[in-house]
Amino acid sequence: MKNNSVLRRLSLVFIGFMLAFGSLFMSVAPASADTVTVKMGSDSGQLIFVPATVTIKPGDTVKWVNNKSFPHNVVIDGQPELSHKKLMQKPKAEIESTFMAAGEYSYYCAPHRGAGMVGKVIVAS
């Protein structure tokens, strides 16, 4: 009988420990990726990206929104898989790229590159 009592207590202690230990893992929120928005064309119609430079973390997404003086696109130097070469004709049209690797990514709008419509994404770990 004494063994049953000790065994029961040990079982309850073990179950309590497992519940407490397991709840630690349940309460930790997973890291979530952010999305940063960049306007394609300023509110006043300038041929620029607003903001021109953004700093994000690996796994974050940049969303470009067609704002003014379109058509626009986003061509990222040396990164065809992240680029969006098709011209966006409609206001408020959106495109996104998710950046997984740390580094600096220069980009431009092909029709307006000569006018200075360039930008940079800095992915810092």
Image: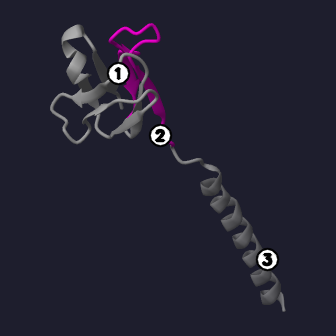
Rounded to the nearest angstrom, the CA distance separating label 2 from label 1 is 29 Å
Q: What residue type is labelled 2?
A: Ala
Please identify the quarter of the rendering in which residue 20 is found: bottom right
Q: How far apart are marks 3 and 1 (CA)?
A: 73 Å
Circle 2/circle 1 CB separation < 8 Å: no
- Coloring applied to the structure: one colour
For disc 3, the marked residue is 9
Q: Is residue 11 above or below residue 47?
A: below
Q: Earlier in the sequence, mark 3 or mark 1?
A: 3
Element class at badge 1: loop
Q: What element carries label 2?
A: loop
The boundaries of the magenta stretch are: 32-57
Q: In this view, does 66 lie above or below 13?
A: above
The amino acid type of the residue labelled 1 equals Phe
The residue that mark 1 highlights is 70
- Residue at the disc numbered 2: 33
- As for residue 118 lying within the magenta part, the answer is no
- Residue at 24% x, 16% y is 112
11 and 64: which one is in front? Answer: 64
- Tell me the CA gap for discs 3 and 2: 44 Å
